Image (spheres, helix red, strand yellow):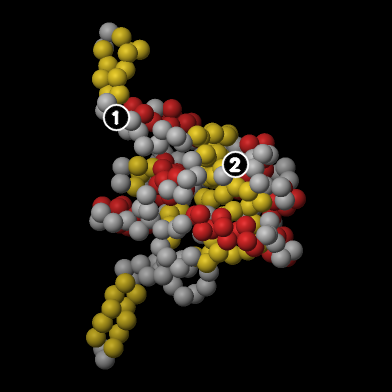
Amino acid sequence: MKVVILCGGKGSRIRDISETLPKPMTFIGGKPILWHIMKIYASAGMTEFILCLGYKGWMIKEYFLNYKTINNDFTIELGNHNEIYFHNEIEESNWKVTFADTGEETMTGARLWKVKKYLDQEEHFCFTYGDGLAGINVKEVVNFHKKQNKVGTVTAVRPSGRYGEIAIEDNLAVQFNEKPQTGEGWINGGFMVFNSKKVWDYLWADDALVFEKEPIPAMVKDNQLAAYTHEGFWMGMDTPRDYHLLNELWNSGDPPWKIW
């Protein structure tokens, strides 16, 4: 099953971290957040990706074109650069990645529409954002989607609180959670699945088409959108604080989204 990842956003709210990198290339533990998302899917055997590129998409292309040299020890003869000896094989050797330029200012629905030609032979496909991580079994999401027999499935998550939550008893702090999961409702956390034969009825050619504002509400109206509830870890990287927290979690040695 193919995985479509939105990689075109500018990430304006996280510019304090990097003015030069597109958001999916922001590094968590020495690897782009995009790589972490792809590893989540690869852990479920999904290794064919379609990246919807936009803002500074050439940097994403450049990273993967040089992936083997960036992530491997190698030896070259300085007088003959055609002779390169790699000392190890990379784990991601079986990944197949399609890089699709979908426009710098294109909205999310239009980006998906523009990669339709790469999905014509698929019965279903996965679809997610290039800035959200989760400790999620995407095989379970896919199986859930197929059982529901709907056009699409979104993964519903509880957003993390922006501030530390304190539990108080008798004027004493008895519990403090740095970034708790709130109970204020569910949001779309990405990790979606769609029927590749039917979803196009809800999309059309318009660069201003926002997937979350028109196609998804239309599916809801038609009772064609299922929701897989994920109670475990999920976090989007929207702000510098999110970036630092994700790096702290990675450096802890047991990041909750590392299921590979």
Task: Tell me the amino acid under the disc marked 2.
Answer: Glu
Mark 1 or 2: in front is 1
The quadrant of the picture occupied by the N terminus is: top right
Query: Is 98 situated above or below 39?
Result: above
Tell which of 91 and 65 is nearer to you. 91
- Residue 104 point in image, percent of width and height: 57, 38
Q: Position of residue 174 (x, y in %)?
A: 26, 82
Residue 88, which numbered label? 1
**Number of residues whose C-alpha sits closer than 10 Å to that of mark 2, classed few (under 14), some (14–19) or many (20 or more):** some
Give the side of residue 25 with respect to residue 168, left or right. right
Side of 58 relative to 71 (left or right): right
Secondary structure type for disc 2: loop
Of the numbered discs in the image, which one, if any, rests on residue 40? none
- Residue 142 picture location, percent across and down: 56, 55
Amino acid type, mark 1: Asn
**Residue, x 51% and y 58% (percent of image)?**
140
* Among the 4 quarters of the image, the one containing residue 38: top left
The residue at 30%/46% (across/down) is 29
Q: Residue at x 46, y 49 (%)?
A: 44
Q: Is residue 216 left or right of residue 171?
A: right
Residue nearest the observer in this picture, 180 or 253: 253
- List the residue tagged with mark 2: 105
* Residue 33 against residue 179 in the figure, above or below: above
Of helix, strand and loop, which one carries label 1? loop
Residue at 29% across, 29% down: 88
